[in-house]
Image: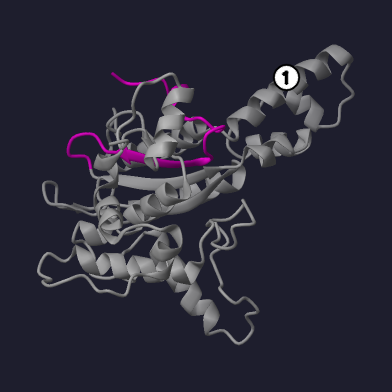
Amino acid sequence: MAQARRSLIDLDSTPYYHCISRCVRRAFLAGFDKYSGQNFEHRRAWLVERFKLLSQVFSIDIAAYAVMSNHYHLVLRVDRSRALNWSKDEVIERWYQLYHGTILVDRYRKGEKLDEAYMYSVDKTVEVWRNRLYDISWYMRNLNEFIAREANKEDNCTGRFWEGRFKSQALLDEQAVLSCMMYVDLNPIRAKMAKSLQDSDFTSIQERIQHYKKQSTSENTEQITPQPKQLMAFGSNANNQIIPFKLLDYLELADWSGRHFDPKKRGAISKTQPKILVELGIEIAVWLEAVQNFRRQYSNFAGQPSALRQCAHQHQQSWYRGVG
């Protein structure tokens, strides 16, 4: 039985969430459809452009993404405190980038002097919009509705484009965040759609690598580890606004992990365990199982057994998949 979204998105437990949406039946999100003979590759760009736009409006950041042929993955971080600190005017301007407003708010924007009762109504409306601007359900709703309309217009048809509402997993600890991001970034390699990280089109890791190469060869760059502005940055544990790992450690780990997906490879796994796994105390076998089977290993909540037990207790549940 499907659970209410409010029981799956718990910002008090974690700001990080893995979201997935899949097309209905044989509908193609992107790529070449052998049944119709059409190529929908350009739709991948629609998605990337749209969720980057939404992350500039919403207080929701993108940690990782992968756009596949009939589904996509997003790892998102909700920044509730940032949204709560926005001024009334900033909330209004952000909302108006995506939606129509109300007559009263229109009058307020024009600078009309409103009486106390009208201003109370404006303030109540703005607070509703503020809450929606850090709500993953509203973010995903806007994203999926936009893509569905564009795809149906292109296909000259009507009806459902997505399989159903999006699926989400709460990432309860650093290990869950790291392994889920890696699972998402390595999707094309695991699906045998790409042979290397650089060839993994429309993934966040390809974008990070391309940006790093471009900026690191520039004579004018002052950054030690240049990173894309529209993606969450990697960095120090001391800053909770960024991903708490070093970018180069992450790229090394992704390269190492991807090489172990090849079923033709024989022999023992390399003894040179990536530094980031050593620092987090993650065993190689546990890591490789997670990045290959993350969706099957966990359900709506992902993390170490202790984090899952604590979250289940808070939600008055007896058990979450992944505890053991």
Give the position of the C terminus as an image quadrant.
top left
Query: Left of 113 or right of it: where is 287?
Result: left
Mark 1 closeness class: few <14, some 14–19, many ≥20 residues within 10 Å:
few
The answer to which quarter of the image holds residue 140 is: top left
User: Which contiguous range is marked in magenta?
Assistant: 1-27
Closer-to-camera residue (321/129)? 321
Residue extending farthest bottom: 219
Closer-to-camera residue (43/265)? 265
Q: Residue at x 55, y 60 (%)?
A: 233
Q: Does the magenta-highlighted stretch encompass residue 8? A: yes
Query: Left of 127 or right of it: where is 176?
Result: left
Q: Residue at x 53, y 45 (%)?
A: 77
Instruction: State the colouring used for the structure image.
Output: one colour
Q: Residue at x 24, y 62 (%)?
A: 189
Q: Does the magenta-highlighted stretch encompass residue 216? A: no
Q: x and y percent of residue 161 in the render?
A: 29, 34
Q: x and y percent of residue 261 in the render?
A: 20, 63
Image: 225 above or below 182: below
Residue hosting label 1: 124
Q: Tag 1: residue type? A: Lys
Q: Residue at x 61, y 43 (%)?
A: 57
Closer-to-camera residue (146/247)? 247
Give the position of the N terminus as an image quadrant.
top left
Whether residue 274 is visible to the viewer of this picture, yes or no, is yes
Q: Secondary structure at mark 1?
A: helix
Q: x and y percent of residue 7 in the render?
A: 45, 23
Q: x and y percent of residue 293 in the render?
A: 24, 48
Image: 297 above or below 200: above
Whether residue 170 is visible to the viewer of this picture, yes or no, is no
The answer to which quarter of the image holds residue 32 is: bottom left
Looking at the rendered structure, the number of numbered marks drawn on it comes to 1
Query: Left of 304 or right of it: where is 24?
Result: left
